[in-house]
C-alpha cells in the first residue's frame, strides 16, 4: 500500500503572503503527522518564495516521520542538503517564472551534471529521487546515473480529460513496472486530488505519493467554519472576561 508524503509548501505560501509568522509550516507539520502522514515534503526554492531555510532547519529537528527535501540540482542546494541531512532528496527542475514545478527533470539530457550530484548525496547516505515524466528514456537515464528512486510526474494524468485519463494512467502503470524492472523504487506526485488519487495509489509497486495543494485546500474547507466560530466567540465573549471576571474589565 502506498504511503503519503504531505507537501506543506502552501502553508508557507500563506505565511509569506503577509511576511509574518503564521501559519508556521513547522508547527503545521506536527499536525500533518498527527493526521497520519508518513512523511513531510518541502521544496526549498532558489528564490525562497515559500519555504525558508529556517523552516528546513527546524523541520529536520522536529519531523518524526520522514523529511523529503525537494530542490533544484544546484551546488547551493546540494550543500544545504548535505548540511541538513533530510531522509530523502527529490531533485526537481526549477524555473523562476513558473507558478509550480512544470514537467519532469530532463535526466536523459543532463546525465553528467546530475550524476555527480546524485553520487555526492547518496555517498553521504541521503537517498535521491528524480522527479521525471513517466517515459522510458528518463527512467533508463535515472538508472544510469544510479539514483535509487524516481518520482513519477502525475501532472499530465491529473490534467487529462475524462476520456484521456485511462491512457495517462496506463502510462504511469507502465512506467512504474519499467522502473521496478530497472531496480528503481517508485514514488509519484503532482496534481493528485481526492477525486483522482485512488487509481494511482493502486499502481503496483507504488511506494509513496507526494500530495500538497489539494490537502491544504481541503483543510480550509473543513476548518474554516470552526475558525470563524472561534473568532466570533472571542469578539462576543472576550478572553479577559473569562480570565478575570467582568468587574476587572
Ligand atoms: N511532487 C513534486 C516533485 C512537486 O514539485 C510537487 C509540487 O510542489 C508535488 C509533488 C505536490 O504537488 P501538489 O501540490 O499538486 O499536490
Image: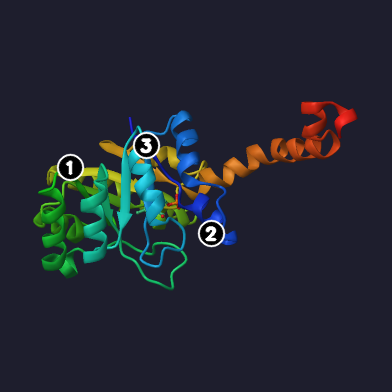
Which residue position holds label 1?
180
Q: Is residue 3 left or right of residue 51?
A: left
Q: Nearer the viewer, mark 1 or mark 2?
A: 2
Residue 42 in the image: state x and y as whole percent: 38, 50
In the image, is 20 to the left or to the right of 83?
Answer: right
> Could you tell me how far apart the alpha carbons at marks 3 and 2 are, in whole angstroms?
21 Å
Tell me the colour scheme of the image. Answer: rainbow
Instruction: Kindly identify which residue carries mark 3.
Output: 63
Q: Nearer the viewer, residue 86 or 235?
A: 235
Of the 4 image quadrants, the one containing the N terminus is top left
Location of the C terminus (image quadrant): top right
Q: Position of residue 159 (x, y in %)?
A: 47, 57
Nearer to the camera, 89 or 132: 89
Above or below 210: residue 105: below
Q: Secondary structure at mark 1?
A: helix
What residue do we see at 86% from left, 31% from top? Answer: 248
Q: CA distance from mark 1 to mark 3?
A: 29 Å
Q: Residues within 10 Å of mark 2 (few under 14, many from 20)?
A: some
The residue mark sitting in front, 1 or 3, is: 3
Total numbered labels placed on residues in the image: 3
Element at badge 3?
A: loop
Task: Give yes or no for contact between labels 3 and 2 (Cβ–Cβ under 8 Å).
Answer: no
Please tell me which residue is depicted at 25% across the width and 45% down the height of the picture: 88
**Residue pushed farthest bottom?**
97
Q: Position of residue 246 (x, y in %)?
A: 88, 29
Residue at numbered disc 2? 16
Sequence-wise, the earlier of marks 1 and 2 is 2
Amino acid at each position: 500500500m502506498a504511503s503519503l508524503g504531505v507537501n506543506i509548501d502552501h502553508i508557507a505560501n500563506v505565511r509569506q503572503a503577509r511576511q509574518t509568522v503564521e501559519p508556521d509550516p513547522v508547527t503545521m507539520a506536527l499536525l500533518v503527522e498527527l493526521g497520519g502522514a508518513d512523511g513531510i515534503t518541502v521544496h526549498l526554492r532558489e528564490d525562497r518564495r515559500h519555504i525558508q531555510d529556517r523552516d528546513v532547519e527546524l523541520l529536520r529537528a522536529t519531523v518524526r516521520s520522514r523529511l523529503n527535501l525537494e530542490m533544484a540540482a544546484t551546488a547551493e542546494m546540494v550543500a544545504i542538503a548535505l548540511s541538513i541531512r533530510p531522509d530523502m532528496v527529490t531533485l526537481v527542475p526549477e524555473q523562476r517564472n513558473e507558478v509550480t514545478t512544470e514537467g519532469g527533470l530532463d535526466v536523459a539530457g543532463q546525465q553528467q551534471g546530475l550524476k555527480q550530484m546524485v553520487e555526492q548525496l547518496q555517498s553521504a547516505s541521503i537517498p535521491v529521487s528524480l522527479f521525471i515524466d513517466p517515459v522510458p528514456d528518463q527512467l533508463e537515464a535515472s538508472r544510469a546515473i544510479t539514483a535509487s528512486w524516481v518520482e513519477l510526474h502525475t501532472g499530465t494524468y491529473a490534467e487529462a480529460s475524462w476520456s484521456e485519463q485511462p491512457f495517462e494512467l496506463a502510462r504511469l502503470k507502465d512506467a512504474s513496472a519499467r522502473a521496478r524492472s530497472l531496480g528503481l523504487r517508485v514514488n509519484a506526485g503532482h496534481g493528485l486530488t481526492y477525486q483522482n488519487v485512488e487509481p494511482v495509489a493502486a499502481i503496483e509497486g507504488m511506494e509513496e505519493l507526494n500530495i500538497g495543494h489539494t490537502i491544504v485546500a481541503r483543510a480550509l474547507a473543513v476548518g474554516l467554519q470552526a475558525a470563524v466560530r472561534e473568532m466570533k466567540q472571542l469578539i462576543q465573549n472576550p478572553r479577559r472576561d473569562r480570565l478575570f471576571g467582568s468587574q476587572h474589565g
